[in-house]
Amino acid sequence: MRLRVERLVSQGLALALSSEGKQVLVSDALPGELVDVVIEREHASYLMARATKIIEPSSRRIIPPCPYWGVCGGCDFQYAEGAYQGELKEAIVADALERTGGVKADSYVIEKQATDTLWEYRSRARFFVDLHSKEVGFLGRLSNTLVPIEHCPVLVAPLNALLADPKRLFDAARREMFANRIAKNGLVEVPAFADVEQAVLLDEEITVAVGPKHFVLTPTVFFQSNLFLLPAMGEYVSSLVVGERVMDLYSGVGTFASFVEETGRSVVAVERQKQCLAFARRNAPNATFYTEAAETWAKRQKMGVDTVIVDPPRTGLDASLPSLMASWKPGRIIYVSCSEASLARDVKRFAQEGYSIQSLRLFDLYPQTFHTESVALLARA
């Protein structure tokens, strides 16, 4: 089947229409391209397809520079120019907000996207180790098989040093194996985190500098992996905060709580994972923390709040949270999102509570992939 791509939608899939007018979602294609595709799955309202040949390529298509592209499961957007990737991600988020959230792009301010280095930026990785074959790498594309990797162009130098000399990874994998932590595919997962100087594995602690702030963490807890852009993101979120009473839901290890806490400001943070919370108390000592699911804690929250910060997982907010948050009557809600789909859905829910999106800024924390981070500012309409 030969198709002309119209635009990119959520998850970077290219949208085209079949001769019968049915929507076809195509992987590895760019807007305007003419492609030959093979249908892989049929659904009631759309088809899933894979591009087999690019008949008329985009002028902004490039040859993926990584030799593992298409085999390794990471870095799925290497076939577009770096600057073009950012443009397309911004369009994908705006498209989701309009089609799912019912919000037109001209009704809010889209601020300049924050970008930095496109390569050697990633400080966090999950290595997979095959102790039998003595191989280390990442999982394959759409599979649970190991792709041995010698060098990854998006990792910072200390993480690539582990690939060049994997002895520490093998030792860590053996410890995990003796603790009976082995995946069903027989591989051992070893999380790692690094700054510009050193890498730590498993439950080893590291203190990383993020602008003027310092955070203590281990590779086993979540922390944004782009230390080049994270300072700008923390400072931007802090600049949006108004008032003296701030709520930080899904606070993790206290990243945003640390940036917004200051003398005279009351910061209450909620995080369900106890391991994260233990680090958060060290990283943001002036905040008050609660260990509970955000939606459970919110049902008991009665006091008024000036600003609410939410940074939920990819699934977005629990359906009960927008109305609960609105009952606190915050002047602002700052929504940090890693998924345009759940962001658009939740923005629509907030609109039903009288809150509309005022501004949006993207932070390209994950170049060469379709993932991005969005910071949306919502206020009473």
Image (cartoon, rainbow, N blue to C red):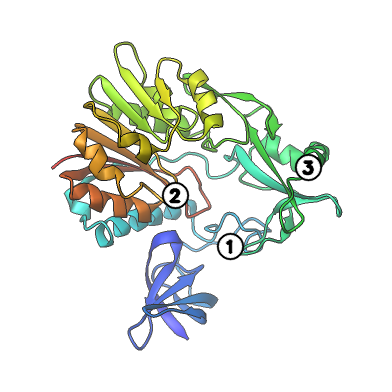
Mark toward the start of the polypeptide (3 vs 1): 1
Q: Is there CB contact under 8 Å for labels 2 and 1?
A: no
Q: Up-down: is 29 above or below 42?
A: above
Judge whether residue 306 can be spotted in this image: yes
Q: Up-down: is 361 above or below 10?
A: above
The residue wearing badge 1 is 63
Residue 195, x across and y down, in percent: 62, 29
Give, as a three-letter code, the residue at label 1: Ile
Q: What label does residue 55 carry, if any?
A: none
**Which residue is at the far bottom?**
20
Q: Up-down: is 238 above or below 94?
A: above
Q: Nearer the viewer, residue 320 or 16?
A: 320
Q: Secondary structure at mark 1?
A: loop
User: Crowding at label 3, few (<14), some or many (≥20) Cα neighbours within 10 Å?
Assistant: many
Judge whether residue 110 can be spotted in this image: no
Residue pictured at 64% horizontal, 38% vertical: 156
Residue pictured at 62% horizontal, 58% vertical: 73
Q: Is there CB contact under 8 Å for labels 2 and 3?
A: no
Q: Nearer the viewer, residue 182 or 169?
A: 182
The residue wearing badge 3 is 173
Q: Secondary structure at mark 2?
A: loop
Mark toward the start of the polypeptide (2 vs 3): 3
Residue pictured at 69% horizontal, 31% vertical: 200
C-alpha separation, residue under disc 2 versus residue under disc 3: 28 Å
Q: Secondary structure at mark 3?
A: helix
The residue wearing badge 2 is 314
Mark toward the start of the polypeptide (2 vs 1): 1
Q: Is there CB contact under 8 Å for labels 3 and 1?
A: no
Give, as a three-letter code, the residue at label 2: Arg
